[in-house]
Image: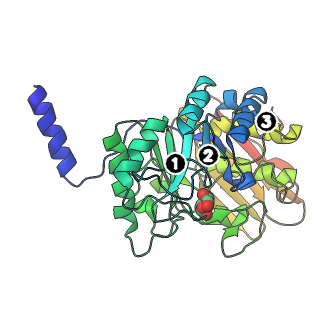
Amino acid sequence: MKTLHVLFALLVSCSGYAQKFEGLAPTPPMGWNSWNTFGLDISEQLIKETAEALIVSGLRDAGYNYIVIDDGWEAMERDSLGNLVPDPNKFPSGMKALGVYLHSKGFKFGIHNCAGTKTCSGFPGGRGHEFQDARTYASFGVDYLKYDWCSHGTANAEETYKTMGDALFAAGRPIVYSLCEWGNNQPWLWGEKIAHLWRTTGDITDCYSCQDVYATGWKYILAKQAGLEKYAGPDHWNDPDMLEVGNRGLSTAESRAHFSLWAILAAPLMAGNDVRNMRDEIRAILTNKEVIAIDQDPLGKQGYRFMEHPSKEIWAKELSNGEWAVCFFNSGDETFQMRVNWAHLPFLKGTFHIRDLWQKKITGKTDRNFSADIPSHDVVLLKLSPTK
Ligand code: GLA
C-alpha cells in the first residue's frame, strides 16, 4: 500500500500538473498588510504593535487573522548559501521568531516576494530560487505568500507562478498562495489550479477616482471586476487589491462604500490602514460583522454588477440559505434619491425581509417600493432574507 502511495505521489509530481494545498481559503482570506500605509518603512516593532492593535480593536476576532509583511523586509542580498535573509536592522530577531510571536497571538503569518529577479523595490526576487525560498518560508513558519510580478523579463506568467506553487507544495507546509500579477495575463483563466487568489488589477491607492500609471482609486478597480465573478469561488478568489479603508485620501463615506463593495466582490479583506491610530468610525466599518459575513458567506459566490448608469450602480451577491446582498452605489457627486421597485430585480424570487447593514435595522419587505437618499460616493447595503 505504502509503495502504491509513493508511486502515485511520484506520478503526480512528474505529471506537469500544478499542485496546491486544497482547503486553505474556503472563504476569502482576511487580515492586514503593511504596504498601503507603511511601504518600506516596516519593522519587527511595527508588526508587533499592529498585532496588539488588531487584538485590542477587535479586528482579529472579527476575522482579520493574517498579518502580511509586504515588500521591504529583506536584506539587499541573499546570504552566501543563496538564502533570503531579513534586514537585520528592521527585523533583528529574524522571521522565524516573528512567526512564533504572531502564532502565539492567534495570527497567521504572511510574507511578500516576487516572481521576478527583484521585488518592485529592488530586493532579491525569487526567480531561479523557488524551491530554496519555499523551504525558507516553511522554516519561517509562513502561512501566506504574496508573490509579485516586477522584473519578470520575458518570463511566462503561468509557468513562473506554477513553479513557485510546486515549490511551496514540495516544501510541505500549507501556505496560502496569493498571485500579485496585476491581471496582466488574465490569471483568472489559469490561477485556480495553482493558487488560492490572484490580483485582477494594478495597485490601488487611497483615493476614490484618481488615476496614474502605477495606482488608481477604487472606483476604477471596481469597474474592472465586472464580469470576473464566474472565475471566483472557494480556494480560488479574484483579488481587487487590499483595502484603503481609513486611509487619508478617502472620506468616511468612500471608505464605507469601498468596504461594502469589496464584500459584495467576495474580495480578500486585507486592511491597509494604521490600526494603531484608527478613528472609531473606521473601526466600526472594518468590524461590521454583518458586512464581513456577506464577504465570507460560505456559498462563496462573488457578486456581480446588475445595473450601471452614469452615476449609480446596483451590485448583487447571492448568499447561502436563499439570501441576497444588494448594494446600491451612488458614484455621482450629488445625493441620489433612490426608489426601488423590487419587481425590477428579477433574480429575487418571492418576498424578502430587508435589513440595512449600515443602519443595522430591518427596514421592511420587498412587497413595497424601497426609498433612501444615498449621499455622494456612498452606498446602501441591504441583506434580503426570504420571508418563508
Ligand atoms: C507591487 C504590488 C503592491 C506591493 C508593491 C511592493 O506594486 O502590486 O501590492 O506589493 O509591489 O513593492
The image shows residue 76 at horizontal and vertical percentages of 56, 59
Q: Which mark is residue 85?
A: 1
Give the class, few, some or many, for how many residues have Cα within 10 Å of label 1's Cα (few <14, many ≥20).
Answer: some
Residue 108: image quadrant is top right
Residue type for callout 2: Pro
Q: Is residue 281 left or right of residue 68?
A: right
Residue type for callout 1: Val
Q: Looking at the figure, which quarter contains the C terminus?
A: top right
- Label 2 SS: loop
Q: Nearer the viewer, mark 2 or mark 3?
A: 2
Circle nearer the N terminus (1, 3): 1
- Foreground pick, 120 / 9: 120
Q: Is residue 91 above or below residue 130?
A: above
Would you name the residue on which mark 3 appears? 364
- Going by the picture, which residue comes out furthest to the front? 80
**Residue at coordinates 77% horizontally, 32% vertically from top-left?**
53
Is the CB–ligand 1 distance for label 2 below 8 Å? no
Q: Nearer the viewer, mark 1 or mark 3?
A: 1
Contact? badges 2 and 3 (CB < 8 Å): no
The image shows residue 239 at horizontal and vertical percentages of 56, 54
Q: Is residue 384 visible?
A: no
Q: Which mark is residue 88?
A: 2
Q: Quadrant of ligand 1?
A: bottom right
Q: Which mark is residue 167?
A: none
